Amino acid sequence: MTQTQSELGLQVRRGLAWSSISNIVLRLGSLAVGIALARLLSPEQFGVFAVALTVQTVLMTMADLGMSADLIRSEEPARKAPTIATLGVVAGTTLAATMAFSAQGTAELLGSPAAGPVIAVMSFSLLLAGVGVVPYATLQRDFAQRKLFIVALVDFTVGTALVLLLITFGWGVMALAAGRLISQAVSLLVQFRLARTPFRLGFDKSIAPSVVAFGVPVAGANLLSWALLNVDNVAISRLAGPVALGYYFLAFNISTWPMSALGQVVRSVALPAFARISGTMRKLSFAIFLGPVWAVALLAGTMLALLSAQLIEFVYGARWLPSAAVLVWLGLFSSLRVGFDLAASYLLAHGAARATLYVQVVWIAVLIPALTFGVIIGGIAGAAAAHLMVSFIVVGPAYAFALHRNGADLRAAFRSLWTPCFAAVPAAVAAVAAAMPFDGPVEGLLAGGTAGAGTYALLLWRWFLRRLGEVRTMLGNDENGPVSGSHAPGPLLVKTKISQPASFAPAQADTVTVVITCYNYGRFLRQAIESALTQNGVTADVIVVDDASTDNSHDVALELAAMSHRVKVLRHQSNRGPVISFNDGAAGARGEFMVRLDADDMLTPGSLRRAVDVARAYPSVGLVYGHPLHFEANELPAPRQAAKAWTVWPGREWLRERCRSGVNVITSPEALMRRSVLQTIGYQAHLKHTHDMEMWLRIAAFADVAYIHGADQAWHREHADSLSATGIDELEDLKARRDAFDVLFSGPTANIPEAPEFKAEARRALANDALTRACHEYDRGSGTAPKAEAFVALAAELVDNPTELEAWNRYARRRALGPALASQPLWSGPPRLARRIRHKMQRRRWHNSGV
């Protein structure tokens, strides 16, 4: 039995949770130990250890020959494990011996002879790494992050205790090497125990070549990757000496906090997740993961760069302040590293090991001369600047090219980057402005960090939550489509470029029934019918329902029906209202899709073809809508006809957002419905004003929802007799929306698991809206009028305790001031301005995104 994507989503969520816990705990522990070591050791001793660690880290990447990645992605892990274990031991032993025998010569070559003995001791860690390939890969493959956390905790605890103990006995730098080696040995035993994987060697000649063929490029890419991150140590050690390297090493360690905390979490689940995502989501999986990952990484890197001096002085002491100039550059570089690591995981998951290797080759080829030049010109800060510049100019484009060659949607990926970048600018300004008045490092760090992170979160939190929703949807998506009578959420795609799949049926096969309801709109009816009949790329059948009009509506309908067999006319003997009119027309529909069109509205050219394309691409979609053009004069505004992108939401995610806002976002003529969904859930409910709204919401409870970007889907006419001109007032509008939600959650939608939560959110949103409108009455000077009191009474009806609502404090302040004082410009001016700005932003968002 193959693993379903819903099971994969559950495993990934658990893996992410435990990875997050692991990294928080271990990062805090490492921070505490690092502070202690920085105060116990000198910069020169740090530099000596950095040289030894550089050699060990670079060679460590070769210890498993990239075989752990092959085992993680393999469909036959048990069959491959013995061969991989044997190759791991051979590789680890060879590398350990090489490192031990060349230790002193390597240390002298790097300009730090004192590092020779330390390198020799640390060489044995390579053997341990080769032995542990299989249990480590097994735990990673199974998303066993809780067990990996236990392994890491044992390694950290044992290593820390030994290092501090040996330093007190005067071992100096050697304490770091010995502690690292012994802790690794203990954690390896724990790893075998938790993975329940025996140490079993074997060799299968049929498997070994493919393992090596995949693993060697991966190991080569990893080697180059770590060489990239350590070649600066070599350059600085050779050109500036171990003391300068000590300062640089400290700054580089701080800059790895985002990579260690976030990168490790992502890396632990991204590779297996990317490997198992298939179908339509494979192309977009990188972009969907990238958004939230980049948002967190950019915030961390920006704060490290801007508050580097305060952070270093507070954590490590004033003697380490020369490291601050380095951290300014490396903080931003660390943000890019997280994105690069995610890109590498995507490429490895799809078998593009050579692509990662090529990127690393290009990277190191450019970085070596750039670092040398940077150290000569700017010292350790120049080396850090070289890292950042090469990443921007060379590495980013190289990874983009490799991702494009391996199926990733680069347009979607770039769109994931811009919003956090824009939010980072005011966040940076706020951080610097808040930290400047303070001389002390603690006050400056707290003020700057709080202001910067708070500004960033305020600007980005809605966007960030939506992007996390996309990740959950992608990991939980079942590509087999919806089951009849149940809701099967489809993929969540954000502004995905539209292209018509080659498998689409001929245009004549796509039939759309347009139901036009008409009451005394004879003067507009001809335009409405013709706008449907002239749609290109589809066959539009028109059903006109004349609701006992007293003008020439029936004559116009009959005239056009005589001219085209695709026009049918129904006539009520008495006026029965728009709901019954639409339901009667819908009952006679024969097309696979349906549009509800008022007789005074029109469809724009190509509207139906654009909507059908989306519905064809996503069978789980039951409702497709776009932007309507509102107009008043007889001359129609020119519509945009080129659809640039679309968005597809899981229906219940879209429904949740509508409940949270409490407002309708669809006018009517711009919406296309799948008729089979309507036949299952029923047509329009008998609501006077919000029958359309309730129907859209009900569809979303049982099918997915799509929005078309860039094109105008309908013309909506504003005139003296239209509902928008003769419509209800604010209080009646709120009550009508309340009725829509009450009807929604008393019908079939009441049976979905989220119904109680959604209904409570909708009533809370409407109650907040009611209190906000009561505030408006106070701002106008009529706070004690019956209308204001009616708004408050409605809020009390909707929720048990309106004093707990977000808008209650605003209302209570105005009530305490009284209508006369609350309406004075000093008090009412700022709220009115804020309302106007908020309203314009909401309109702009609706215009761009449909919500």
Image: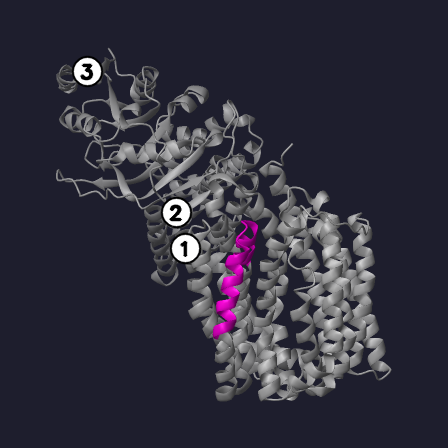
Residue visible at 43% across and 53% down? 405
Measured as percent of width and height from the top left, residue 317 is found at 67, 83
The residue range painted magenta reads 342-366
Question: Do tag 3 and tag 2 residues touch (Cβ < 8 Å)?
Answer: no
Q: Which mark is residue 565?
A: 3
Q: Residues within 10 Å of mark 2 (few under 14, many from 20)?
A: some
134 sits left or right of 394 in the view: right
Q: Which mark is residue 495?
A: 2
> Distance of mark 2 from mark 1, alpha carbons?
9 Å
Q: As displayed, is residue 325 above or below residue 360?
A: below
67 sits left or right of 666 in the view: right
Write down the quadrant of residue 229 in the picture.
Answer: bottom right
Q: Residues within 10 Å of mark 3 (few under 14, many from 20)?
A: few
- Disc on the earlier residue, 3 or 2: 2
Indicate yes or no whether the magenta region holds residue 357. yes
- Disc on the earlier residue, 1 or 3: 1
Kind of residue at badge 2 = Lys
* Foreground pick, 400 / 585: 400
Q: Which mark is residue 415?
A: 1
Q: Identify the secondary structure beneath mark 2.
A: strand
Quadrant location, the N terminus: top right
Q: Residues within 10 Å of mark 1 (few under 14, many from 20)?
A: some
Q: As displayed, is residue 294 above or below residue 585?
A: below
Write down the quadrant of residue 559 in the picture.
Answer: top left
Measured as percent of width and height from the top left, residue 147 is found at 75, 52
Kind of residue at badge 1 = Arg
Question: Do tag 2 and tag 1 residues touch (Cβ < 8 Å)?
Answer: yes
